[in-house]
Image (cartoon, grey):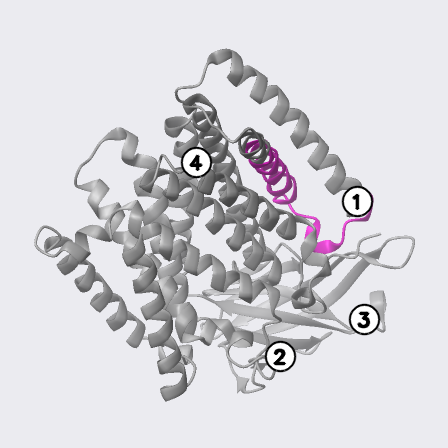
């Protein structure tokens, strides 16, 4: 692992030099076909490295847990910085306030993708059924992140303001540039339901969409229920808040994402990998009586977390804001609560072993199993949230502070699992990583509401009555 930390340090230094020499990364340059060329070069490089793994020590080394641990540590550390500092387009702290354009951040994550891809290829070619969770998880991460990153420049996201009875065919991008997306929208009626205190319960727009090929599509657009027409997804984005139910216009978000299929394929592989992780990796080498005791404890702990979330955050079904009124709401929250309970139980085990200053093999096996299953539920919750976000806001991952801390938590538990493989005898370091991971989990769960990075910037800091 010393080599890994040295390589990571070298990548950080190289990234800083690039940041000084040529400035931040300009992702807008990776528009088609440049992103396709980059993808082909990446696949060729991976093929060459895998083919030469027997001759070049570095390539073979990158396929093992000892290389993954330092990489994940660097990735988690940079992502923590991203979660602590407000991410803005202009101003803020130099470099660190535009982390997605910061060369060291991008180089470390690229290194992590290369390691994941090589490790997956290595396990594919030494095929065993128990390797399925490993392969699906690693390949799923690579496919989803690479497709989302390289396809980002091809995403078209426009806003169109449409007044009642007046068809509109012009839309603007984030820079205010005018576009004609090839369709026109006519607003027939805007409707809105309110709670007793005047906050919106539901708002929707009855529209007709006219396309260049003469097709007319009629439908109702509301939050969590976009309308798809000719490759565009039309989202209910806003309205005249001063007029409320009497609003005479609606604001629509129009999104076209040519790479979305590959992102969904990656997410599907990760979901399948998380399920297989529970089926194939746990439980193992743990007595049946202890398994039953742990299951009872975890269920009770999950119920406690669910009750705390329900009452402390004020998320009552009778007063949910429109964005939260989705079929994804219940599964997203429930699987997260079970992951919190499982990972909380693993943390209790870690504290217990650190206090005693010793750990038996059965105790570490039990802790590993709790983390395996907890991480699987955590992955479900994170990906359910991504799919929900796509239906609600048109983007599956926007590096919102809440999403950033979800990624931090996920990376920290990956550090634990990879460290257990790389150094199975170092139980103390593993236990300390569990404690740090659970702290990050708490920040993701409720601490995010108090961080400066989320104030006025996060769509996840709900104020629900």
Q: Are marks 2 and 4 in contact (CB under 8 Å)?
A: no
Verify CB contact (< 8 Å) between mark 3 and mark 1. no
The secondary structure type at the circle numbered 4 is: helix
CB under 8 Å between discs 3 and 2: no
The segment highlighted magenta reads 318-346
Tell me the residue that label 3 is attached to. Answer: 241
Residue 427: assigned label: 4
The answer to whether residue 339 is above or below residue 28 is above
Residue 64, percent from left and from top: 26, 46
- Which numbered disc, 2 or 1, marks the residue closer to the eye? 1
Marks 4/3: CA–CA distance: 56 Å
Find residue 25 and report its horizontal and vertical position in percent: 41, 79
Q: Identify residue for label 1.
A: 312
User: Which is nearer the eye, 115 or 241?
Assistant: 115
Query: Which residue is outermost to the right?
Result: 196
Residue depth check, mark 3 versus mark 1: number of the one nearer the observer: 1
Q: Is there a contact, CB below 8 Å, between mark 2 and mark 1?
A: no
Q: Indicate which label's residue lies in the foreground, 1 or 4.
A: 4
The answer to whether any part of residue 33 appears in the image is: no
Q: Earlier in the sequence, mark 4 or mark 3?
A: 3
Mark 3 and mark 2: span between their CA atoms? 20 Å
Disc with the residue nearer the chain's start (3 vs 2): 2
């Amino acid at each position: 692992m010393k080599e890994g930390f040295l390589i990571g340090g070298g990548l950080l230094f190289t990234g800083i030099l690039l940041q000084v020499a040529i400035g931040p990364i300009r992702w807008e340059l990776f528009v088609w076909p440049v992103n396709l060329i980059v993808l082909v070069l990446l696949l060729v490089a991976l093929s060459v490295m895998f083919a030469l793994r027997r001759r070049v020590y570095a390539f073979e080394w990158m396929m093992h847990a000892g290389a993954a641990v330092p990489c994940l540590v660097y990735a988690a550390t940079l992502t923590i910085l991203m979660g602590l500092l407000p991410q803005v387009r202009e101003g803020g702290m130099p470099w660190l306030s535009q982390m997605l354009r910061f060369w060291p951040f991008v180089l470390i994550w690229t290194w992590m993708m290369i390691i994941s891809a090589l490790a997956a290829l290595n396990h594919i070619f030494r095929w065993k059924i128990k390797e399925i969770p490993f392969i699906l998880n690693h390949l799923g991460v690579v496919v989803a992140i690479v497709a989302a990153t390289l396809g980002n420049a091809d995403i078209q996201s426009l806003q169109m303001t449409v007044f009642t009875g007046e068809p509109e065919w012009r839309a603007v991008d984030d820079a205010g540039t005018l576009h004609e997306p090839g369709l026109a929208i006519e607003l027939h009626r805007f409707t809105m339901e309110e709670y007793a205190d005047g906050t919106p319960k539901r708002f929707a727009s009855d529209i007709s969409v006219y396309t260049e090929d003469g097709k007319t599509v009629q439908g109702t657009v509301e939050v969590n229920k976009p309308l798809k027409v000719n490759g565009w997804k039309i989202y209910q984005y806003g309205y005249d808040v001063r007029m409320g139910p009497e609003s005479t216009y609606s604001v629509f978000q129009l999104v076209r994402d040519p790479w979305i299929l590959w992102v969904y394929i990656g997410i599907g592989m990760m979901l399948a990998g998380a399920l297989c992780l529970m089926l194939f990796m746990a439980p193992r080498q743990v007595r049946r009586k202890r398994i039953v005791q742990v299951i009872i404890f975890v269920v009770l702990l999950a119920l406690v977390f669910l009750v705390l979330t329900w009452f402390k955050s004020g998320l009552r079904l009778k007063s949910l804001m429109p964005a939260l009124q989705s079929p994804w709401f219940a599964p997203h929250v429930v699987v997260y609560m079970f992951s919190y309970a499982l990972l909380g139980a693993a943390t209790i085990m870690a504290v217990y072993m650190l206090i005693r200053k010793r750990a038996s093999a059965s105790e570490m096996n039990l802790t590993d199993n709790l983390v395996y299953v907890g991480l699987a539920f955590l992955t479900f919750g994170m990906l359910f949230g991504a799919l929900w976000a796509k239906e609600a806001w048109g983007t599956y991952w926007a590096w919102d502070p809440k999403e950033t801390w979800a990624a931090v938590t996920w990376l920290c538990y990956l550090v634990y699992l990879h460290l257990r493989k790389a150094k199975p005898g170092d139980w103390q370091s593993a236990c300390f990583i569990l404690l740090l991971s659970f702290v990050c989990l708490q920040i993701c769960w409720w601490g995010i509401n108090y961080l400066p990075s989320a104030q006025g910037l996060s769509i996840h800091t709900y104020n629900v009555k």
